[in-house]
Image (cartoon, grey):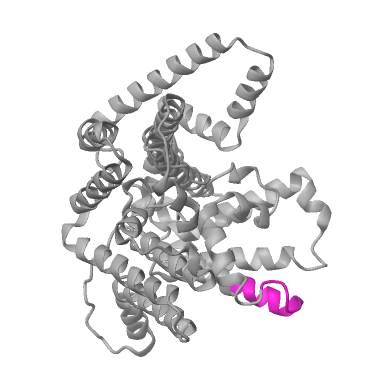
């Protein structure tokens, strides 16, 4: 089951919401949400429900150990981190390691064929952050296993984030209220994310998929750049759309999740891009890897090394493929260069900084999207040398860009750069009557939901990109 499926929209979500509103006490509502979350996960991968529960159990028991007066708390924290990483590594990276060994040695070892558990990277990182925080401050832990289970399994953010830190929601698990304004705000945020996915991400994805499936002979520079830009739009609207839906659902049940995206394509540097892109992940690596490594406290060279380690880990976290690792190092390289004194500071303050940042991002996502490093090389070659502009390529380009696709891609560009959002803010600043604002918003969100549902009815299944991570 996914957020953009009819079963979720018209059965699971209404039943879960109504049940939560009808139950008389907060402990019962928490139990109801936990049960609903486990059912939600089971629709996708029932056999791996035991793995999710095992992860919660491991982190709960280590949390109890870390809350005790034991003198071996450092050992407990180390074992907890190792246990989480071992589970993640076994299910996500075993075949990757075997394939790498086979490529380097020709050993011909058989792959295990392990199916990647949905959401394992997200719930593993949430479990790790919990035990690390309890190690640092024992009072931030809980002795109630139900609270930890709800925190890790809560269905809005279980599958693809945002990564939530326990101490940010612990108070909300114990005390929260659902007001009409919060429910309306959450519903609108959910609809906005749903629209991003169905109208913008999927449209851009259809073009990107078609281009990335072409052979070297079928590509020219126009097609290659079109595919790269479309994938850059797809991954943003796909993932930010999911985050919007998760944040909106959280509000509907009384939870306030932190923002995960803040118009990253408006950034004028790679450093700024990562302050705006997948904020929960970059914050996680900052707090639980970069700072423990020494951050920027141990000299310039160590700072640069720490950045590269973090971006290597960021790339590897995204998937068991060298394209993801190189994508992470690509961003790490430019983040490191920007921290050097020789880097032109004025660049980050001018429109040239925006162009530079988007070029780095687009080229990086081209590598990210490619199935292999060789496939990425084919795309890069076409992007920078494929200037033949043959008639067959032109016909293919025209076939991809029908009027509806062009319109939605242009809308995607406008929204990615925040132009309609800023226009709406300026309109509100002109003291537009509240009744007029609310009426326009209600009409707009209703129309967006209706169009998105109609699009869903006529579309093939297109899962969120970050489900694979």
Q: Answer whether residue 295 is visible to the viewer in this image.
A: yes
The majority secondary structure of the magenta stretch comes to helix
Location of residue 294 with respect to 251 vertically, above or below: below
> Which residues, given as a range, are shown in magenta?
295-308
Count the marks: how many?
Answer: 0
Q: How far across and how far down the image is residue 10, in percent?
A: 22, 30
Judge by depth and name the residue closer to the eye, 137 or 221. 137
Q: How far across and how far down the image is residue 279, in percent?
A: 55, 53
Instruction: Tell me: 372 left or right of 275.
Output: left
Q: How far across and how far down the image is residue 66, in percent?
A: 43, 75
Judge by depth and name the residue closer to the eye, 238 or 169. 169
Q: Answer whether residue 379 is visible to the viewer in this image.
A: no
Instruction: Tell me: 340 left or right of 250.
Output: right
Residue situated furthest front in the rendering? 69
Judge by depth and name the residue closer to the eye, 426 or 34. 34
- Residue, x 56% and y 56% (percent of image)? 363
Indicate the quadrant containing the N terminus: top left, top right, bottom left or bottom right. top left
Q: Quadrant of residue 15?
A: top left
Residue situated furthest left in the rendering? 47
Location of residue 289 with respect to 250 vertically, above or below: below
Q: How far across and how far down the image is residue 82, in percent?
A: 40, 80
Q: Quadrant of residue 402?
A: top left
Location of residue 106 with respect to 396 vertically, above or below: below
Magenta-drawn stretch contains 301: yes
- Residue, x 53% and y 62% (percent of image)? 284
Indicate the quadrant containing the C terminus: top left, top right, bottom left or bottom right. bottom left
Location of residue 85 with respect to 37 vertically, above or below: below
Magenta-drawn stretch contains 158: no
Judge by depth and name the residue closer to the eye, 82 or 320. 82
Instruction: Tell me: 85 left or right of 108.
Output: right
């Amino acid at each position: 089951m996914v957020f953009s499926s009819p079963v979720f929209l018209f059965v699971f979500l209404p039943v879960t919401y109504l049940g939560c509103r009808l139950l008389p006490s907060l402990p019962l509502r928490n139990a109801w949400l936990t049960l609903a979350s486990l059912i939600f996960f089971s629709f996708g991968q029932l056999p791996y429900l035991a793995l999710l529960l095992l992860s919660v159990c491991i982190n709960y028991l280590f949390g109890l150990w870390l809350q005790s007066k034991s003198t071996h708390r450092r050992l407990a924290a180390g074992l907890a981190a190792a246990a989480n990483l071992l589970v993640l590594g076994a299910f996500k990276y075993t075949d990757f390691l075997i394939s790498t060994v086979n490529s380097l040695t020709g050993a011909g070892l058989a792959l295990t064929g392990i199916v990647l558990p949905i959401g394992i990277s997200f719930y593993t990182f949430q479990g790790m952050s919990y035990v690390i925080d309890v190690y640092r401050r024992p009072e931030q832990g809980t002795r109630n296993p139900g609270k930890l289970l709800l925190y890790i399994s809560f269905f809005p953010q279980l599958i693809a984030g945002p990564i939530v830190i326990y101490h940010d929601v612990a108070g909300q698990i114990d005390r929260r209220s659902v007001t009409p304004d919060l429910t309306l705000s959450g519903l609108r945020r959910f609809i906005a994310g749903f629209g991003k996915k169905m109208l913008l991400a999927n449209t851009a994805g259809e073009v990107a998929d078609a281009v990335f499936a072409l052979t070297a002979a079928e590509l020219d520079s126009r097609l290659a750049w079109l595919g790269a830009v479309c994938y850059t739009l797809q991954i943003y609207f796909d993932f930010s759309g999911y985050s919007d839906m998760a944040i909106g659902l959280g509000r509907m049940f009384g939870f306030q999740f932190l923002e995960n995206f803040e118009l990253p394509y408006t950034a004028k540097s790679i450093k700024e891009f990562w302050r705006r892109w997948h904020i929960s992940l970059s914050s996680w690596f900052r707090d639980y890897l970069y700072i423990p490594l020494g951050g920027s406290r141990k000299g310039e060279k160590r700072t640069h090394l720490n950045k590269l380690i973090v971006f290597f880990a960021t790339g590897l976290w995204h998937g068991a493929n060298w394209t993801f690792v190189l994508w992470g190092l690509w961003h790490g390289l430019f983040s490191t260069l920007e921290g050097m004194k020789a880097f032109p500071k004025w660049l980050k303050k001018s429109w040239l900084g925006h162009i530079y940042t988007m070029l780095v991002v687009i080229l990086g996502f081209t590598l990210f999207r490619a199935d292999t490093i060789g496939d990425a090389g084919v795309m890069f070659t076409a992007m920078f040398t494929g200037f033949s502009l043959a008639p067959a390529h032109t016909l293919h380009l025209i076939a991809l860009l029908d009027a509806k696709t062009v319109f939605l891609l242009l809308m995607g560009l406008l929204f990615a750069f925040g132009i309609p959002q800023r226009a709406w803010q300026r309109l509100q600043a002109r003291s537009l009557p509240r009744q007029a604002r609310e009426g326009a918003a209600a009409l707009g969100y209703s129309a967006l939901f209706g169009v998105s549902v109609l699009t869903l009815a006529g579309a093939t299944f297109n899962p969120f990109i970050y489900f694979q991570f």
